Amino acid sequence: MSGQSTAEKLKRYTQLEYILVGDLRDLLEDPIDDDNLRWIHAVVDALLDSLPVEFELKRQGGYLREVLERHPNWLCHVATLESQHRRLCRHLRELRNRLSDPDHVEETARVLSLELKAWMDNFDAHNRQERRLMQTAMNLEVGTGD
């Protein structure tokens, strides 16, 4: 990806994450066995590899810079999303570490399956919030009074 612009790289990482989250959803629909658990682990590892890179690409030039240029007073919204992204990465890393724990794998797998589903829902909500903030910032016209 060395010859690509930041925007192109970001698009590729975003697409990759979309595919990985879809794969993880599919895997979690199947019964948890050793083979399925290995695949879940591999997908979570791939997500943990891509999420920090994607966010770093978003931060190059300023995270949600376009929003802050139009609405500097929205800094708290942007900071909340940035913090939320870090928490999502940290939580996924914790889930991955628990997936690696050989003790109580079967019991842990059922609980982790639910927690991974909740994580994916939170990740999707985070991405929607980013898009909504960007769309609102671009579409909101702050006019002068009559």
Image (cartoon, grey):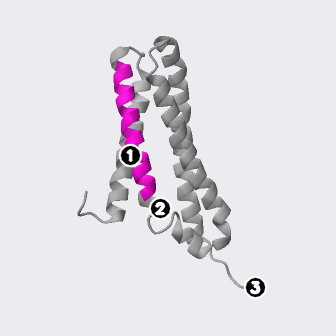
| SS for dot 2 | helix
Question: Which amino acid, mark 1?
Answer: Ser
Viewer-side residue, 2 vs 66: 2
Image x and y of residue 23, in percent: 37, 33
Q: Is residue 36 left or right of residue 127?
A: left
Image x and y of residue 101, in percent: 46, 19
Residue on which disc 2 sits: 59
Q: Tell me, yes or no, whether the highlighted magenta stretch contains residue 78.
A: no
Q: Is residue 103 left or right of residue 26?
A: right
Viewer-side residue, 32 vs 42: 42
**Closer to the N terminus: mark 1 or mark 3?**
1
Name the residue rendered at 57%, 58% in the picture. 132
Q: Is residue 25 left or right of residue 68?
A: left
Q: Which numbered dot is residue 145?
A: 3
CA distance for labels 1 and 2: 14 Å
Q: Which numbered dot is residue 115?
A: none
Question: Which amino acid, mark 2?
Answer: Arg
Q: Which residues are magenta?
A: 36-56
**Closer to the N terminus: mark 3 or mark 2?**
2
Image x and y of residue 47, in percent: 40, 40
Residue on which disc 1 sits: 50
| SS for dot 3 | loop
Q: Residues within 10 Å of mark 2 (few under 14, many from 20)?
A: few
Name the residue rendered at 46%, 14% in the picture. 105
Asked if residue 29 is positioned above or below residue 45 in the image, the reply reads above
Q: Quadrant of the N terminus?
A: bottom left
Name the residue rendered at 54%, 64% in the picture. 135
